[in-house]
Amino acid sequence: MTKTRTITVGVLALQGGVVEHLNLLRRATAHVQSPDSLRFTFAEVRTAPQLAQCDALIIPGGESTTMAIVARRLGLLDPLREFVKVQHKAVWGTCAGLVMLAEEAVATKQGGQEQIGGLDVRVLRNRYGTQMQSFVANLDLAFLGEGEEPFRAVFIRAPVVEEVISDGGSGSQKQAGKVEVLGVCQVPGQQTEGEGKGDIVAVRQGNVFGTSFHPELTDDVRIHVWWLGQVADALRHGRLAVDGV
């Protein structure tokens, strides 16, 4: 008899699009293709003990400075760094989440902000201006599969990856592999030349995935389906310990 494996996916619930992510995650489970007997459960995360119960985590969009301050006050910053950079558990950051997962950020508020880190990139906050300059763009995301329709991505005060700053850290917090660019957005109102030119808005490095935009603010579950599939694949290859397996 095949043993059912349960994967607990948390959404950091300090601020931002928590409910929206949870709704799409639940819908996405119906589309995850896996040869194993897997069951996903989802939880809001506000404390270190709740985080410790998770096998994977989403850090949602919101306001990155506020999220970092609240995480510090709740004693969550160091456990989050441990989760991402030492335990190497799967994590996905959207918009503000991408800012927090970057090793460096520019255009921060006065005094800067604390990072979780995990992605060897420097991000530029608020690349496209204020909330009034929000927009939707069609992105060709090859990782979703050949022949897939463009993804209608929602950008709200979005950051972009300004530069890849290294190919992995050092010591116990070394990241696995190089930074992969998974999505590029043509800058609104600006001509770019050559394939792949534009702003980097989706990246992955080992267990860490980041997007500048907000998939949770659409009805399109494809990125959530893909990411859950990546989490399940990590389990199958022994990169994620679940239920003591």
Image (spheres, helix red, strand yellow):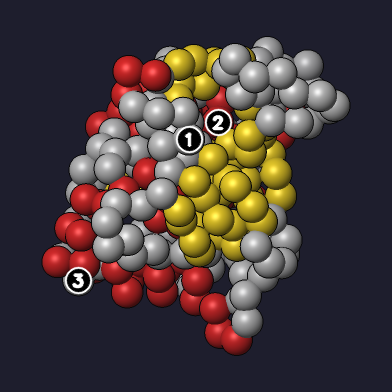
- Give the image location of residue 179, x and y in percent: 69, 56
Residue drawn where x is 58% and y is 36% of the image: 201
Residue 220 in view in this figure: no
Nearer-the-camera pick, 231 or 203: 203
Residue at the right extreme, as displayed = 194
Tell me the CA gap for discs 1 and 3.
30 Å
Tell whether 212 sits left or right of 59.
right
Judge depth for marks 2 and 3 and give the one in front: 3
Q: In which quarter of the view is residue 146 placed?
A: top right
Disc 3 crowd rating (10 Å Cα; few below 14, some 14-19, many 20+) is some
Q: Earlier in the sequence, mark 1 or mark 3?
A: 3
Q: Nearer the viewer, residue 90 or 172?
A: 172
- Name which residue type carries label 2: Ile
Which residue is under mark 3? 75
Q: Amino acid at mark 3?
A: Gly
- Label 2 residue SS: helix
Q: Is 165 left, or right, of 50 in this rendering?
A: right
Q: Residue at x 27, y 56 (%)?
A: 110
Rendered position, 58 above or below 217: below
**Of the residues under marks 1 and 2, which one precedes in the sequence?**
1
Q: Earlier in the sequence, mark 2 or mark 3?
A: 3
Q: Position of residue 102 (x, y in %)?
A: 49, 57
**102 displayed left or right of 198:** left
Q: Residues within 10 Å of mark 2 (few under 14, many from 20)?
A: some
SS label for mark 1:
loop
Percent of width and height locating residue 235: 59, 58
The residue type indicated by label 1 comes to Arg
The residue that disc 1 covers is 127
How many numbered marks have been drawn onto this rendered protein structure?
Answer: 3
| Residue marked by disc 2 | 223
| Mark 1 and mark 3 residues within 8 Å of each other at the beta carbon | no
Q: Is residue 153 above or below residue 76?
A: above
